[in-house]
Image (cartoon, helix red, strand yellow):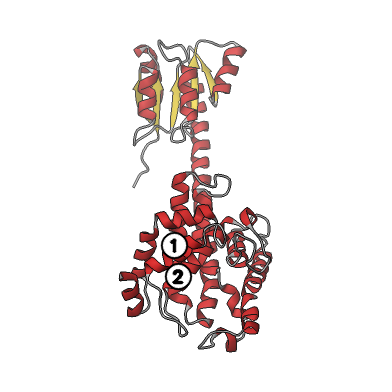
Amino acid sequence: MSRPRQRILVVDDMPSNINVLNLILKDDYAVSAARSGPDALRIAGSETPPDLILLDVMMPGMDGYEVCRRLKADPSTRGIPVLFVTAMADNEDETRGLEAGGVDYLTKPVSPPVVLARVRNHMQLKLHQNHLELLVAQRTRELAITQEVTIQSLASLAETRDNETGGHIMRTQRYVEALGRHLLSLGEFPGELSEESLSWIHKSAPLHDIGKVGVPDAILLKPGKLTPDEFETMKLHTVYGKEAISRAEKLLGTTENSFLAHARDIAYSHHERWDGKGYPRGLSGPDIPLCGRLMAVADVYDALVSKRVYKSPVPHHKAVSIIAEGRGTQFDPQVADAFLAISETFREIALAFADFEEERQALST
């Protein structure tokens, strides 16, 4: 099966000039034409854009320089090579064309062998560029998959040690995303919260309790309330989690701006308190990473509405009241306000991923 012919758009207000270029190119390429700048922009932005544009400079209304500038300003068309074809042959004119984003400059009257040679060269360059872009996109997808698998593999370690972790991971991951999504819609935390950072916070949330793999079974699996000494040992899971993820970063050679950075911060800081009375470092206010502040609300809500061997689940309205009371002391006020605004979403998530009927009943009251 033969490959579809590459497409060329000829832009010129003079039909005779279009006809000349069509005669030169039609045997090797699929040629279309536009007689004005707006028509050229429309065709270039269509579902079947040209692979290359031959563009006249002197046209009524929008000249070729402006057409080229607009093509290069639009992400959907900036990759199309533009060759200026004009009778204006001064160095100054050529410089203007190149500065506007053109890749080459042909002077009228055109020489058919020169036009064909230049077009073929730029078409080959375009094919090479497209191939490189496909390779980069493929490698980017592979890297993203590898990163997500790394996170999920680490999270599975916590699940093998803690019989309460599975449902807790699914719920808290969704709580955190809902909180972040609401804050993002309000334009809160512009220097810390973006679509990209929220994506990584969501993906990293399952690692918040990864450090529990370092807690002794006698404490981690104790079917009852912990003693003060046992609780001190349990609190070290934040340190163990941070250290485990830091080691993974070093092994991957990604200690600077690592994709695991949010996971490390979540594991280390999700038990810090806004008033500085949390652990392990006693951080306060905005010194606590935002991802840790988000996870703090998600983690406490889930602990409240979940059944444990040492307690019954708290009704949803009571959990909401407890978090509201912790606004400005235990929790970041803005994050607490976001929770209060979307608390019904939290209840729906908890219901959808509840582990026990007793939890569903408490959430429904």
Question: x, y percentage for residue 241?
Answer: 62, 71
Q: Which residue is mark 1?
A: 175
Left or right: 342 as drawn, with respect to 336: left
Q: Is residue 40 visible?
A: yes
Q: Is residue 135 visible?
A: no
Comes first in the chain, label 1 or label 2: 1
Q: Quadrant of residue 292?
A: bottom right
Q: As shown in the figure, which amino acid type bears the numbered disc 2? A: Asp
The count of marks equals 2
Badge 1 vs badge 2, beta-carbon distance below 8 Å: yes
Q: Residue at 40% of width from left, 35% of height from top?
A: 6
Q: As shown in the figure, which amino acid type bears the numbered disc 1? A: Tyr
Left or right: 238 as drawn, with respect to 51: right
Closest to the observer, 42 or 24: 42
Left or right: 111 as drawn, with respect to 4: right
Question: x, y percentage for residue 141?
Answer: 49, 56
Secondary structure beneath label 2 = helix
Question: x, y percentage for residue 237?
Answer: 62, 75
- Residue 302 circle label: 2
Q: Quadrant of residue 351?
A: bottom left
**Screen quadrant of the C terminus:** bottom left
Q: Which-is-in-front pick, marks 1 and 2? A: 2
